[in-house]
Image (cartoon, grey):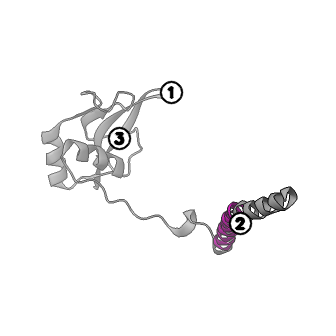
Amino acid sequence: MSLKIRLSRGGAKKAPFYRLVVADSRSPRDGRFVERVGTHNPRLPHDHAERLVVKEDRIKHWLSVGALPTDRVQRLLSKVGLTEAPKINEQTKKDKPRAKTLERMKEAEEAAKAAAEAAEQAKADAAEAPAEEAPAEEAAEEKAEG
Protein backbone atom coordinates (compact mmCIF):
# COMPACT_ATOMS: atom_id res chain seq x y z
CA MET A 1 0.00 0.00 0.00
CA SER A 2 1.61 3.29 -1.12
CA LEU A 3 0.90 6.12 1.25
CA LYS A 4 0.71 9.81 0.46
CA ILE A 5 0.64 12.83 2.70
CA ARG A 6 -1.82 15.06 0.92
CA LEU A 7 -4.52 17.70 1.29
CA SER A 8 -8.16 16.82 1.86
CA ARG A 9 -10.54 19.69 1.13
CA GLY A 10 -13.20 20.88 3.51
CA GLY A 11 -15.07 24.11 4.09
CA ALA A 12 -17.81 25.82 2.12
CA LYS A 13 -17.93 26.85 -1.51
CA LYS A 14 -15.27 29.53 -2.21
CA ALA A 15 -14.06 29.18 1.40
CA PRO A 16 -11.55 26.31 1.33
CA PHE A 17 -10.08 24.64 4.37
CA TYR A 18 -7.68 21.72 4.05
CA ARG A 19 -6.63 18.85 6.30
CA LEU A 20 -3.23 17.26 5.88
CA VAL A 21 -3.90 13.54 5.86
CA VAL A 22 -1.99 10.33 5.34
CA ALA A 23 -3.98 8.26 2.86
CA ASP A 24 -3.65 5.42 0.42
CA SER A 25 -2.72 6.88 -2.97
CA ARG A 26 -5.63 5.07 -4.62
CA SER A 27 -8.34 6.55 -2.36
CA PRO A 28 -10.24 9.67 -3.48
CA ARG A 29 -9.15 13.18 -2.46
CA ASP A 30 -11.75 13.62 0.27
CA GLY A 31 -12.20 9.91 0.90
CA ARG A 32 -10.85 7.49 3.47
CA PHE A 33 -7.55 8.30 5.16
CA VAL A 34 -5.25 6.64 7.68
CA GLU A 35 -4.48 9.60 9.95
CA ARG A 36 -5.02 13.35 10.11
CA VAL A 37 -1.65 15.07 10.65
CA GLY A 38 -2.46 18.78 10.33
CA THR A 39 -4.54 21.56 8.85
CA HIS A 40 -4.02 24.33 6.30
CA ASN A 41 -6.24 27.41 6.03
CA PRO A 42 -5.24 29.39 2.91
CA ARG A 43 -7.63 32.23 3.75
CA LEU A 44 -5.53 33.36 6.71
CA PRO A 45 -2.55 35.73 6.20
CA HIS A 46 0.84 34.14 5.54
CA ASP A 47 2.26 35.17 8.91
CA HIS A 48 -0.75 33.92 10.94
CA ALA A 49 0.07 31.10 13.36
CA GLU A 50 -2.98 28.98 12.47
CA ARG A 51 -2.51 29.11 8.68
CA LEU A 52 -0.54 25.84 8.83
CA VAL A 53 -0.82 23.60 11.88
CA VAL A 54 1.07 20.29 11.76
CA LYS A 55 1.83 17.39 14.07
CA GLU A 56 5.56 17.32 13.44
CA ASP A 57 6.28 14.04 15.23
CA ARG A 58 3.58 12.18 13.27
CA ILE A 59 4.70 13.64 9.94
CA LYS A 60 8.29 12.62 10.69
CA HIS A 61 7.04 9.13 11.53
CA TRP A 62 5.09 8.77 8.30
CA LEU A 63 7.97 10.14 6.23
CA SER A 64 10.31 7.61 7.86
CA VAL A 65 7.86 4.79 7.10
CA GLY A 66 7.86 5.76 3.42
CA ALA A 67 4.84 8.03 2.90
CA LEU A 68 5.47 10.51 0.09
CA PRO A 69 4.15 14.08 0.32
CA THR A 70 2.47 15.61 -2.71
CA ASP A 71 4.16 18.64 -4.29
CA ARG A 72 1.86 21.11 -2.53
CA VAL A 73 2.24 19.42 0.85
CA GLN A 74 6.01 19.21 0.40
CA ARG A 75 6.05 22.95 -0.29
CA LEU A 76 4.03 23.59 2.90
CA LEU A 77 6.23 21.29 4.98
CA SER A 78 9.36 23.00 3.67
CA LYS A 79 8.11 26.27 5.19
CA VAL A 80 7.95 24.52 8.57
CA GLY A 81 11.36 22.92 7.99
CA LEU A 82 10.33 19.26 7.83
CA THR A 83 11.34 18.64 4.21
CA GLU A 84 13.21 20.33 1.38
CA ALA A 85 11.25 22.42 -1.10
CA PRO A 86 10.25 20.46 -4.21
CA LYS A 87 12.37 20.92 -7.30
CA ILE A 88 10.69 23.13 -9.88
CA ASN A 89 10.92 21.58 -13.33
CA GLU A 90 11.74 23.80 -16.29
CA GLN A 91 8.91 24.67 -18.63
CA THR A 92 8.70 23.15 -22.06
CA LYS A 93 9.06 25.25 -25.19
CA LYS A 94 5.30 25.57 -25.51
CA ASP A 95 5.29 28.86 -23.59
CA LYS A 96 7.91 30.38 -25.94
CA PRO A 97 7.04 32.12 -29.24
CA ARG A 98 7.47 30.13 -32.42
CA ALA A 99 10.26 30.69 -34.97
CA LYS A 100 8.19 32.82 -37.34
CA THR A 101 7.00 34.99 -34.47
CA LEU A 102 10.59 35.43 -33.32
CA GLU A 103 11.55 36.56 -36.85
CA ARG A 104 8.72 39.10 -36.89
CA MET A 105 9.70 40.38 -33.45
CA LYS A 106 13.33 40.76 -34.61
CA GLU A 107 12.23 42.63 -37.75
CA ALA A 108 10.02 44.96 -35.70
CA GLU A 109 12.90 45.56 -33.29
CA GLU A 110 15.27 46.40 -36.17
CA ALA A 111 12.67 48.73 -37.72
CA ALA A 112 12.21 50.52 -34.40
CA LYS A 113 15.99 50.85 -34.04
CA ALA A 114 16.29 52.25 -37.59
CA ALA A 115 13.48 54.74 -36.90
CA ALA A 116 15.19 55.85 -33.70
CA GLU A 117 18.49 56.33 -35.56
CA ALA A 118 16.72 58.32 -38.30
CA ALA A 119 15.10 60.54 -35.67
CA GLU A 120 18.49 61.08 -34.01
CA GLN A 121 20.03 61.97 -37.40
CA ALA A 122 17.20 64.39 -38.20
CA LYS A 123 17.60 66.02 -34.79
CA ALA A 124 21.36 66.36 -35.34
CA ASP A 125 20.84 67.85 -38.83
CA ALA A 126 18.29 70.31 -37.45
CA ALA A 127 20.73 71.41 -34.74
CA GLU A 128 23.55 72.00 -37.27
CA ALA A 129 21.45 73.83 -39.88
CA PRO A 130 20.58 76.99 -37.83
CA ALA A 131 24.24 77.42 -36.82
CA GLU A 132 25.27 77.54 -40.51
CA GLU A 133 22.43 79.85 -41.55
CA ALA A 134 23.12 82.45 -38.85
CA PRO A 135 26.41 83.79 -40.38
CA ALA A 136 24.83 83.83 -43.83
CA GLU A 137 21.90 85.91 -42.53
CA GLU A 138 24.30 88.35 -40.83
CA ALA A 139 26.24 88.73 -44.09
CA ALA A 140 23.00 89.38 -45.97
CA GLU A 141 21.99 92.02 -43.42
CA GLU A 142 25.38 93.75 -43.73
CA LYS A 143 25.10 93.90 -47.51
CA ALA A 144 21.61 95.36 -47.21
CA GLU A 145 22.89 98.08 -44.84
CA GLY A 146 25.95 98.91 -46.85
Residue position marked by numbered label 2 in the rendering: 125
Q: Nearer the viewer, mark 2 or mark 1?
A: 2
Q: Nearer the viewer, residue 51 or 124?
A: 124
- Image point 14% across, 47% down: which residue? 61
Other-residue count near label 3 (Cα within 10 Å), few / some / many at <14 / 14–19 / ≥20: many
Q: Position of residue 10 (x, y in %)?
A: 40, 30
Name, please, the residue furthest toward the right: 144
Q: Nearer the viewer, residue 33 or 142?
A: 142
- Image point 20% across, 56% down: which residue? 66
Going by the numbered disc 1, the residue's amino acid type is: Lys
- The range drawn in magenta is 102-129
Q: Nearer the viewer, residue 63 or 32?
A: 63
* Residue 121 vertical position relative to residue 38 in the rendered view, above or below: below
Residue position marked by numbered label 1 in the rendering: 13
Q: Nearer the viewer, mark 3 or mark 2?
A: 2
Disc 3/disc 2 C-alpha distance (Å) = 69 Å
Dominant secondary structure (helix, strand or loop) of the stretch shown in magenta: helix
Q: Position of residue 90 (x, y in %)?
A: 42, 65
Q: Could you tell which of marks 2 and 1 lies nearer the N-terminus?
A: 1
Magenta-drawn stretch contains 75 = no
Magenta-drawn stretch contains 128 = yes
Task: Mark yes or no: residue 113 visible.
Answer: yes
Which quadrant of the view contains residue 97?
Answer: bottom right
Residue position marked by numbered label 3 in the rendering: 7
Q: Position of residue 70 (x, y in %)?
A: 33, 51
* Residue 100 vertical position relative to residue 142 in the rendered view, above or below: below
Which quadrant of the view contains residue 34?
Answer: top left
Going by the numbered disc 2, the residue's amino acid type is: Asp
Going by the numbered disc 3, the residue's amino acid type is: Leu
Disc 1/disc 3 C-alpha distance (Å) = 16 Å
Please tell me whether mark 2 sits on a helix, a strand or a loop. helix
Please tell me whether mark 1 sits on a helix, a strand or a loop. loop
